[in-house]
Every structure is written in structure tokens, then in C-alpha cells.
Image (cartoon, rainbow, N blue to C red):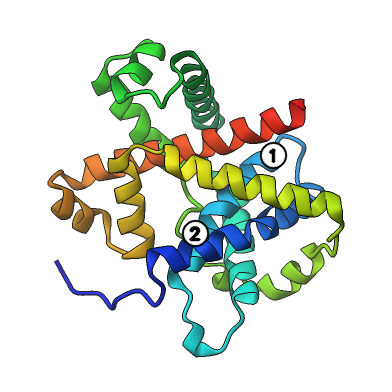
Amino acid sequence: MRLRPAPTTNLQERDALVLAHVDLVKTLANRLGRRVPSHVEVSELVSVGVLGLIDAASRFQPSLGVPFDAFARRRIHGAMLDALRGLDRVPRSVRRLQRTVDATLTRLRHLLGREPETEEIASALGMDTVEYDRVLDELRAADVAVVRQAGNNANGEDLVEILMDGDDGPHAALERRELAARLAGALAELPERERHILALYFQEELTLAEIGHVIGVGESRVSQLRTQALARLRSLLQDGLAAAHAH
């Protein structure tokens, strides 16, 4: 396994940056949501944007003199744009499958009162674990925005300026606190192995093959577990947003 430079921020610093800037994700998602087709849900943009924020916090280097807010905007917004571009390339059948898996995770979570095991997810989908693994492989095609860099977008800066929202009133502050709590809770709910994989992928920037070497499984299995972890995180965030709207 090749050596990589140590991350500039440790896990505590990264988590503090993420929780302090989750409001930025919702702001950008809401503004972008007004400019995209109606079938694109804001909650999907939020969950993708949160992953972009985690990636930004993992890669941030204060020594470069760039404010984290500006650095994170580009990556969050870029992740959302990549997700929208990805939707154009992903077959509708795969997107429907992704929604089915997300809904199943939510239903099982409510029924069991905990995060479901892989076998339970497969059974609820009417599959065995081998079939479910194939589903996770298919869903990899829909997971296109996780590791993209917003800086690769030609007009990224101009678009970010358009999407900025200055709302900082009491209601916005309350929403920021609620979203921060939901994100912290969602990350904490992930099974330990899947949290470990996401940490190695985002924080340590290891490849799937390298992660497989660390945890003792093959690259394809790491890919499946990462896809499942992201599905859980997306489902948890959407579940939290839906519960908040119900109240």
C-alpha cells in the first residue's frame, strides 16, 4: 500500500468543521433546487452536499490561507452539480432501485428501532445476500458525486455566487442547529465497519483496493459496503428531514 501524506486536520477538527458549516449545505441545496427539474428532491441535494462538505473538511489545509467557507462552497456545490450530471447518465431503473433501497432502509429502521443488518435489508427486498450485493454493484452507477471536486467545474465560482443566500434570521439559525444534529446523529448511527470505510475513503484518501487491504476484504466488497454506507447516510438524512417537515 502506497504512503500518503497525513491529513492536515484530525478527526475532531474535521467533525467540528462539518458541524459548523452544515447550514451552508442546506442554503446551496435550496437555491439550486429552485433551478432544477421537479423530480430532483432538495433532500437528495442536501445528502450529496453533506458528503461534499465532509470531503472538504477532510482535505482542508489552513496553511494555504484560503478560508474554509470559500473552500467548502466549491466542493459542496461541485458535488451537487456532479450529482445532477450523474442523474442524466444513470438509467431511470437504477434511480428507482436506489429509491427502493432507501425506502426499505427507512422502513426497517422504524420497524426494528435500529440500523438493519445486510441480511435483513436483502430479505426485505425479497432477495438473498448474493442478489443484494448485485444491487449494490448496480447502485454504484448512481453514486457519482461523492468524490468529485467542485474546482473542476468551469464556472464553479460564478455559480456559487448566484446560489449564495444571506438569510441569517432566527428561523435559519434554528434550521442550522437541527440539520447539524441530524448529521451528527446520522453519522453516529452507521455501523462501525461502514463508518471506518468512509473514514478511510474520505479522511485518509485511500483507494478501494487499499481499504480492502486494511480491513481484509476484496476491492469489490469494499465498493459494496461503501455504497451501502452512503445509502444508509442518505436514508438517515432524508428520514430526518421528512420528520422535521411533518412537525
Percent across and percent down for residue 209 are 20, 55
18 vs 136, nearest the viewer: 18
Percent across and percent down for residue 167 are 85, 60
- The answer to whether the residues at label 1 and label 2 have Cβ atoms under 8 Å apart is no
Q: Amino acid at mark 2?
A: Ile
Corner quadrant of residue 24: bottom right
Corner quadrant of residue 165: bottom right
| Direction from residue 66 to residue 220 in the image, left or right | left
Percent across and percent down for residue 98 are 50, 30
| Quadrant where the image shows the N terminus | bottom left
Q: Earlier in the sequence, mark 1 or mark 2?
A: 1
Residue depicted at x 37% and y 20%: 121
From the image, tell me which residue sits under label 1: 40
Residue depicted at x 51% and y 41%: 185
| Direction from residue 178 to residue 193 in the image, left or right | left
SS at circle 2: helix
Answer few, some or many: residues within 10 Å of disc 2's Cα (few below 14, many 20 plus, some between 14 and 19): many
| Direction from residue 123 to residue 164 in the image, left or right | right
| Direction from residue 134 to residue 139 in the image, left or right | right
Residue depicted at x 55% and y 71%: 152
From the image, tell me which residue sits under label 2: 54
Residues under labels 1 and 2: Cα distance? 22 Å
| Quadrant where the image shows the C terminus | top right
Front: mark 1 or 2 = 2
Q: Judge whether residue 76 can be spotted in this image.
A: yes
24 vs 210, nearest the viewer: 24
Corner quadrant of residue 207: bottom left
Percent across and percent down for residue 91 are 52, 34
92 vs 224, nearest the viewer: 224
- The relative height of residue 227 versus residue 95 in the rendered view (above or below) is below
